[in-house]
Image (cartoon, rainbow, N blue to C red):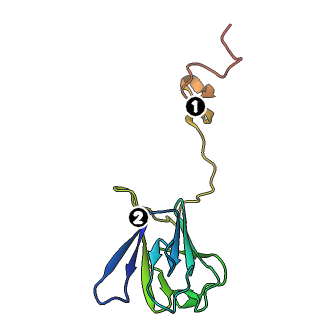
């Protein structure tokens, strides 16, 4: 299961597993989630799951698709806890996360920062020499004669 939609408009809380990277919602027989209401178009909207990102696109439905009360006009990013409304059906998105890993954004960490392999980092060697990490002696080409 890649994510789940929790139906909040039903009297009893229903959890719908999102099992495909492209998850079609509508009334049509070929939809992954079929909603039995004349307010719902045959192909109403499409959820796309790519990596950690979930987006929704309205597919030209008559009554629209809404995220947190705002009508979806183009592909829209869905975040954990966002409300998705299709006609009178309301869902909350809950992405599935791998066990044991908590995904969060640390404000002090730049995700675009350069990273280095240990062998690329210069370090001080005993005796004041400088060399490559993990290397014995000086830098290449500076062998003792």
Q: Secondary structure at mark 1?
A: strand
Labels 2 and 1: the sequence-earlier one:
2
- For the view shown, which residue lies furthest in the front direction? 29
Q: Nearer the viewer, residue 100 or 105?
A: 100
Local packing at callout 1 (Cα closer than 10 Å; few below 14, some 14-19, many 20+) is few
Q: Quadrant of residue 109?
A: bottom right
Q: Secondary structure at mark 2?
A: loop
Q: Compared to 96, does 139 lie above or below?
A: above
On-image quarter of the N terminus = bottom left
Q: Quadrant of the C terminus?
A: top right
Residue 78 % position (x, y): 53, 75
Residue placed farthest to the top in the image? 145
Residue 35 appears at what percent x and percent y? 45, 83
Q: Do tag 2 and tag 1 residues touch (Cβ < 8 Å)?
A: no
Which residue is rendered at x = 38% and y = 82% of the image?
A: 7
Front residue of 85/35: it is 35
Q: Residue furthest right?
A: 141
In percent of the image, x 49 and y 64: which residue is there? 106
Residue in view at x 46 percent, y 92 percent: 88
Q: What residue is at 45 percent from the left and 75 percent from the top?
A: 33
Q: Where does residue 32 sit, x and y in percent of width and height?
A: 47, 71
Q: Along the line of sight, which residue is nearer the eye, 51 or 107? A: 51
Given this view, does label 2 or label 1 mark the residue nearer the observer?
2
- Label drawn at residue 124: 1
Marks 2 and 1, how far apart at CA: 45 Å
Residue with the mark numbered 2: 96
């Amino acid at each position: 299961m890649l994510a789940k939609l929790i139906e909040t408009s039903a009297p009893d809380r229903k959890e719908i597993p999102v099992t495909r990277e492209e998850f079609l919602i509508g009334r049509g027989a070929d939809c992954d989630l079929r909603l039995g209401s004349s307010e719902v178009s045959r192909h109403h909207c499409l959820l796309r799951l790519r990596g950690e990102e979930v987006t929704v696109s309205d597919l030209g439905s008559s009554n629209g698709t809404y995220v947190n009360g705002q009508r979806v006009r183009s592909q829209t990013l869905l975040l954990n806890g966002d409300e998705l409304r299709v006609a009178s059906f309301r869902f909350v998105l809950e992405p599935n996360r791998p066990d044991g890993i908590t995904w969060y954004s640390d404000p002090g960490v730049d995700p675009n920062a350069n990273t280095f392999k240990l062998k690329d980092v210069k370090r001080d060697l005993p005796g004041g020499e400088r060399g490559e990490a993990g290397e014995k002696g000086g830098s290449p080409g500076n062998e003792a004669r």
